[in-house]
Image (spheres, rainbow, N blue to C red):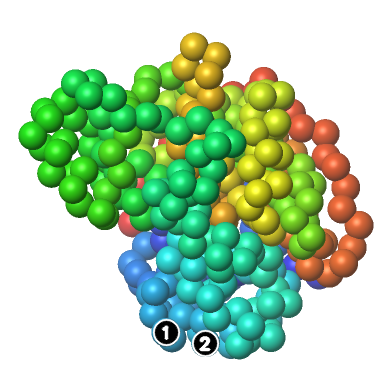
Amino acid sequence: MKNKILISCANGEISYELISFLKKKYYVIGIDNNKLGLAKKICDKFLVSPKGKSKKFPKFINKISKNVDAIFLFADEEILNISKNINKFENIKKKILISDYKTISICNDKKKLEVKLSKLVNFPALKKSKEVLIKPKIGRGSKNIIILKDQNIIRSFKNNNKYLVQEFIEGKEFTTDCFFKKNGVLHQLITRERIVKKNVSIVGKTVKDKNIISIVKKISSNLKFKGSVNFQFIKKNNKYYLLEINPRISGSIIFSIRSKFDIIKYNINHLKNLKLNINKINYNKIYFRYYQTYN
């Protein structure tokens, strides 16, 4: 019998490929607060959920978690809400691996993250009269990011505590998917270079980068992670900068899964206290993702 997994954001723009792939091995229950989309067609079962920030969301997840083996949430607000209320719901605690609320709160606020880790890792610095990147302190992916040179406009964003203003750096971008055990120990990770992107990664290449491995281990000694976590880096002139940490499964996890980094299986086995294997990763592979039209 197939393990049953719960996937949120099932009507998302990149969900079709992931869910279609996972259905070969798992019974997939998809949820989304938007009822319009392909989830009804591709999931084994689809349910409309409350919004991730809603007080109803944890109760909804707790109810349906009785019938699943593992829960995977893709939205920051969902993870934050569940981590804050997880001790109220025994069903959820048994079916999901997520970091503690304090860790998630720090990672979701990019300014807090920079303050926490500024002595350990490099962050894009702010330099006068240079091109800058402006992004929401709380946000995900490349949404609502602005690149500017106009100092008058930049100044208005610097005075707005909802935004983070950083030096704009052009370089190679990397996403690192990680799985951490319940005790916070890193089990395995995989890094891919973002070759082409449009808000999300479209073409990626798996790479083995010892510097990134070292940085992730350094960070995880100061922030305790559990379950799925992804890190975003940029490299310029052999210097690595941390862009963000998302304490959840990444939107482009399909690249990692196809490279033999089976984070879904890791989560299920660890929740069931089964043995965790170290898979042999397929490095230097290029993977493509594309959009399709359906009716």
Q: Residue furthest front?
A: 119
Residue at 66 percent of width and 24 percent of height: 211
Quarter-of-image position of residue 274: bottom right
Residue 17 visible within the image? no
Residue 151 visible within the image? yes
Residue 93, placed above or below residue 279: below
Residue 97, placed above or below residue 282: below
Residue under label 2: 59
* Quadrant of the image containing the N terminus: bottom right
Q: Are marks 2 and 1 in contact (CB under 8 Å)?
A: yes
The amino acid sitting under disc 2 is: Lys
Residue at 42 percent of width and 84 percent of height: 55
Looking at the rendered structure, the secondary structure element under dot 2 is helix
Residue 201, placed above or below residue 247: above
Expressed as whole percent of the image width and height from the top left, the position of residue 99 reads 63, 62
Q: Residue furthest right?
A: 275
Mark identifier at residue 55: 1
Expressed as whole percent of the image width and height from the top left, the position of residue 191 reads 63, 32
Residue at 36 percent of width and 55 percent of height: 138
Residue at 39 percent of width and 80 percent of height: 54
Mark 1 crowdedness (10 Å alpha carbons): few <14, some 14-19, many ≥20: few
Q: Residue furthest left?
A: 152
Q: How far, Cα to Cα, is label 2 from label 1?
A: 8 Å
Residue 111, placed above or below residue 7: above
* Quadrant of the image containing the C terminus: bottom left
Image position of 136 (left or right of 32): left
Expressed as whole percent of the image width and height from the top left, the position of residue 146 reads 23, 37
Looking at the rendered structure, the secondary structure element under dot 1 is loop
Residue toward you, 34 or 85: 85
Image position of 279 (left or right of 184): right
